Amino acid sequence: MKLLTAFFILNFFATVSWLGDFNEATTEAVKTHKLILINFSGSDWCGPCIRERKEILENATFENYADGHLILVRADFPRQKKNQLSKEQTHRNEILADKYNPDGKFPYTLLVDEHGKVLKDWDGFPNESPEAFVEQIASFTSGGN
């Protein structure tokens, strides 16, 4: 019973790590053969971005899947002064946007392979359940699980 309780608590409070450096993500993806999910977000001004984060990307279904199958990268573009990123992080986000989001779409989420090839993109809020979102991603992974 204690083991079951511990498992529930760990899964319930499990949070995944989002990287801010795409080069670091690709290095990790090459080593682990995982796909990379890139999320372009305006965390403090973009309503659909905030909704995507709360309803899908911070949902236990997504986080549990991502923990074992994905490398996550967030390129955030906050507007409020109190939320500003470091100059280095802003520069990394701008370089990533130049490559994958030159039109400045928000939210914009991409699934890429370890070499940076785009496999799938979601332009705007993915109007689907976290389960359906994960199923789409899983269809690109070996075995689909």
Image: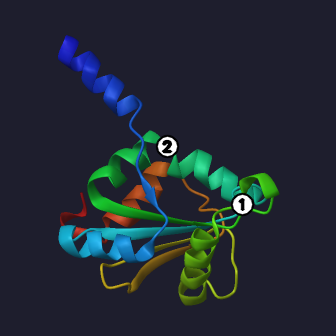
x and y percentages locating residue 69 in the rendered image: 28, 59
Circle count: 2
In this rendering, the answer to whether 27 lies above or below 58 is: below
Residue 78 vs residue 1, the one in the foreground: 78
Dot 1 crowding, Cα within 10 Å, few <14, some 14–19, many 20+: some
Which image quadrant is residue 103 in? bottom right
Which image quadrant is residue 29 in? bottom left
Residue, disc 1: 84
Q: Residue at x 18, y 65 (%)?
A: 143
Q: Which residue type carries mark 1?
A: Gln
**Disc marking residue 114:** none
Placement of the N terminus among the 4 image quadrants:
top left
Placement of the C terminus among the 4 image quadrants:
bottom left
Asked whether, in this view, residue 39 is left or right of residue 68, the answer is: right
Asked whether, in this view, residue 73 is left or right of residue 144, the answer is: right
Q: Which residue type carries mark 2?
A: Asn
Front position among marks 1 and 2: 1
Mark toward the start of the polypeptide (1 vs 2): 2
In this rendering, the answer to whether 19 lies above or below 99 is: above
Query: Dot 2 lies on which element?
Result: loop
Q: Residue at x 63, y 65 (%)?
A: 86
x and y percentages locating residue 16 in the rendered image: 40, 48
Q: Residue furthest front?
A: 87
**Image coloring type:** rainbow
Q: Residue at x 66, y 69 (%)?
A: 124
Query: Dot 1 lies on which element?
Result: loop
Asked whether, in this view, residue 143 is left or right of residue 74, the answer is: left
In this rendering, the answer to whether 20 lies above or below 47 is: below
Residue, disc 2: 59
The Cα atoms of the two marked residues, 1 and 2, are separated by: 25 Å
Q: Residue at x 40, y 57 (%)?
A: 134
